[in-house]
Amino acid sequence: MTSTQQPNAWCNLPLQPSEPIWPQGEQVLLSPSGIATYAICPRQFYYTHWLKLKTPASWSNIKGIWIHWLLERLSITEWRQHAMACDLLCELATQCLTLKTPKAAISSTDDKLLMIAQAHQAFVDESSLYHAIAAGSKLQRQHLLKWTHNSLRNLNDASFFQRAYHAKAWHSEVVFEAKTWTGTLTNVQEPTQPHPQSLLRGTADVLMQDPDGSWLLLDFKSLGATVLAQKNVTTRLESLKRVFTAPDVSQASHRKKFPLKASQTKFYQLPVYYHLAMQQPPVVVSHEGHQTAPKLSVGIQAVRPEADVTTLILASDFIAEHTPPLLEALHQAMVQPLQQENQMPEAVSEKQACESCRVRQVCLKSV
């Protein structure tokens, strides 16, 4: 290192924790993203979820955050039940991604102009997303705009907006919490407030109620994944069902191999969200002094251009049967080792996982 070079800010970080991540007796707070990260690489989990190292988001991450933000407009009734919801979102996307100044139509009497202007102002006020997109190149924003328009048109052709239009209720970015990982379910009266004893916490993309009163928990997927790449809908659904097969925890002895496939980690939000949603409002309802939970299905909604975006839905009976053993297996393979061990395994050797790792430079210093 020359005298003009500055040392890496992370160069003195430990490669291993000096004590158990979570000592025995302390509650473990985990999220679906934490589980997915740990399954890919426990060391990456240690840096990003325990030491909370912050790294710049990739353009792919920004792309996913952007389309999620755009579809959140559907939680507003006037957007969801507008006859031209797809066109409205496309026009909003054009104004946002061309970085136009919010129009003076914020005081307009034209309902369409007023809705777009208000949403555009909300985008500008969402400073982290706005600045992340503004920091991209003009070409990147042009590609993102084309991708957004084509994705929305594809959803429209697949009648996604019709389903949203007829929904009795539509909740976006629903925060769920639970005091229990497995066993007796505990209702949390204020799910939007952090609870110090929570074991699981996550934010679901959409929780909607169909006209027949049934509930559907929907997770948006904007990037490619093995399950979504299958051409046949039935094949994709069967592949998604295999995600819910409880892994053989014995394969994870000494923490050298986590018993989850990399392709499965993208979908582990579903059982966790199901477990959480069944414990609290708006799914849990009171009837004659007793807490009851109606049937809840979960599904994946792809948001991509030029792809079959048929909603993949797992029936409530199937997920109710497979979620408890799956969560128990995850608890044994992840939570218990975290409470007992202070020695992380070696970093994963999968080339693709390492190349996309946000904290790769920390591991490289040990080579």
Image (cartoon, grey):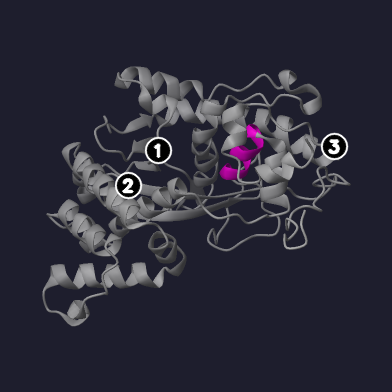
Q: Residue at x 63, y 56 (%)?
A: 54
The three-letter amino acid code for the residue at tag 3 is: Gln
Measure how far apart labels 3 and 1 are at the Cα level.
34 Å
Label 3: state its secondary structure. Answer: loop
Specify the quadrant of the image occupied by residue 156.
top left
Q: Residue at x 86, y 40 (%)?
A: 342
The three-letter amino acid code for the residue at tag 2 is: Gln
Camera sees residue 327:
yes
- Residue 367 in percent (x, y) is at 78, 35
The three-letter amino acid code for the residue at tag 1 is: Leu
- Residue 149 in percent (x, y) is at 22, 48
Earlier-in-chain disc, 1 versus 2: 2
Measure how far apart labels 2 and 3 are at the Cα level.
46 Å
Q: Where does label 3 land, which residue?
A: 343
Q: Where does label 1 land, which residue?
A: 223
Specify the quadrant of the image occupied by residue 364.
top right
In the rendered view, does 126 fall on the left or right side of 82?
right
Which mark, by number, is residue 261? Answer: none
Instruction: Please identify the residue farthest to the right as the structure is shown.
Output: 18
Specify the quadrant of the image occupied by residue 295.
top left
Q: Where does label 2 land, which residue?
A: 209
Q: Residues within 10 Å of mark 1 (few under 14, many from 20)?
A: few
Q: How many marks?
A: 3
Earlier-in-chain disc, 2 versus 3: 2
Report the front residue among 285 and 46. 46
- Residue 270 in percent (x, y) is at 49, 37
Label 2: state its secondary structure. Answer: strand
Q: Please provide the residue range marked out in magenta.
A: 32-40
